[in-house]
Image: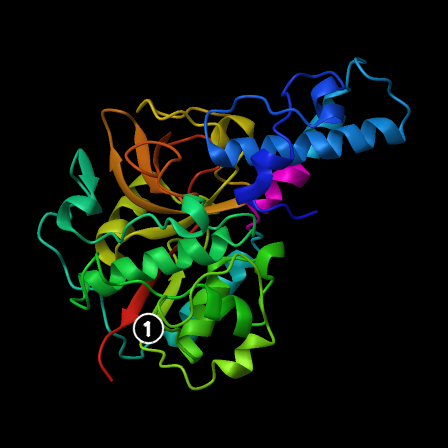
Amino acid sequence: MVIPLLVASAIVGLSTRSRVSAQAQKGQAAPAKNKVYAHVIAVQNLLLAQQAAAVGLPQGALVPPGLRKRAFEQAVQQVANTRIPPNFLQLAKERQAKVQGKALTKTKKVAGADPKAKSFDWRTLKKVTPVRTYMGNTGQDSCGCCWCFAGIAAFESSSLILGAGSPSTLDASEQLILDCGKTGGCNGDWYWTAWRYMEAHGTSTEADVPYKGYVDEPECAAKSGVARPYKVQDFNLVSASEPIPKAAEIKKSLCDHGPLAVAVYADDAFVDYPAAGQVFKGFPSSPSDPSAPINHAVTLIGWDDARSAWLIKNSWGSAWGVEGGYMWIDYSSNNIGFAAGWVTAKVGP
């Protein structure tokens, strides 16, 4: 079931109560704090009403927690559908061995990027492109390609660090990768897939192949002559041995390579993150568990030790979160930093 965020509020807003809602059956909207959360809850409750009817629960009956959880997990896939392969650490080791000894372009050191600093934010150095406001400021809309947005955002920052373009003009196309990359598309994948494709083929500007919110493979052939100026030089994980690298490792890689693509678990509270500036604190992370739950990809751009928090850039439009599409998240919450990856843009011929 795919319902565009642009029309979700016109379809159903739905209650978040743990009973079979009369609103669900009448299609009445309930207030929500942000458009993305409204959409996820709308789809969740549509699914919940269907599942409740399937097991014979009458209107007003208490819904078993497991039923609501399952409905939410299905609904959130429309905005959070990152799927890290179970052998991701082995893939990192293999890639490390493959490129060992090769002369690869290194991200240049930038004054002010100090892993020992108490706080740091790549935006202050103008090395972060804007949060994308495609599809009526819903960002990726109802396509679960957060993995591609996170990968592109990290790549764009690497390009800026290496002196290519400016934050206001640099905008690489996610859509070309979705159409031509034989990826999981809206049904889930991870940022390595985007980087591998860009390493081999590159991607176009957003202006040449704009984002649609769905995969359109037949269009790929029509785009064969489009210029692809954005290419990847190198990429890998921050750590090939730890599912969630230690904070010091993440800070060093963040300063060495630029903003990182990382996985996190977007649960109900994460999606409903309020724009009040507070640090999000969810469930405790499992840093050594390679099968720890994750479902979303974001771009990690900074930290603040005083808050004990990472600063992440999301792909749900500028109306979500704080400061126009960002979140402060506790260092040890919701498996933030899982499969943290860096990318180096190829600059020049």
Q: Position of residue 150 (x, y in %)?
A: 41, 53
Q: Position of residue 59 (x, y in %)?
A: 82, 17
Mark 1, residues whose alpha carbon is within 10 Å: few (<14), some, or many (≥20)? many
Image: 173 above or below 180: above
Image: 200 above or below 165: below
Residue 75 painted magenta? yes
126 vs 85, left or right, is left
9 vs 19, left or right, is left
Q: Position of residue 190 (x, y in %)?
A: 52, 57
Image: 164 above or below 285: below
Q: Position of residue 142 (x, y in %)?
A: 56, 48
Q: Tell me which segment is drawn in magenta.
A: 73-82
Residue 89 painted magenta? no
Q: Is residue 315 visible?
A: no
Residue type (three-letter) at the residue carrying disc 1: Tyr
Q: Residue at x 59, y 73 (%)?
A: 217
Choose top left, top right, bottom left or bottom right for residue 324: top left
Label 1 residue SS = loop
Q: Look at mark 1 in the image and give the residue it sits on.
A: 230
Q: Nearer the viewer, residue 285 or 259?
A: 259
Q: How is the image coloured?
A: rainbow
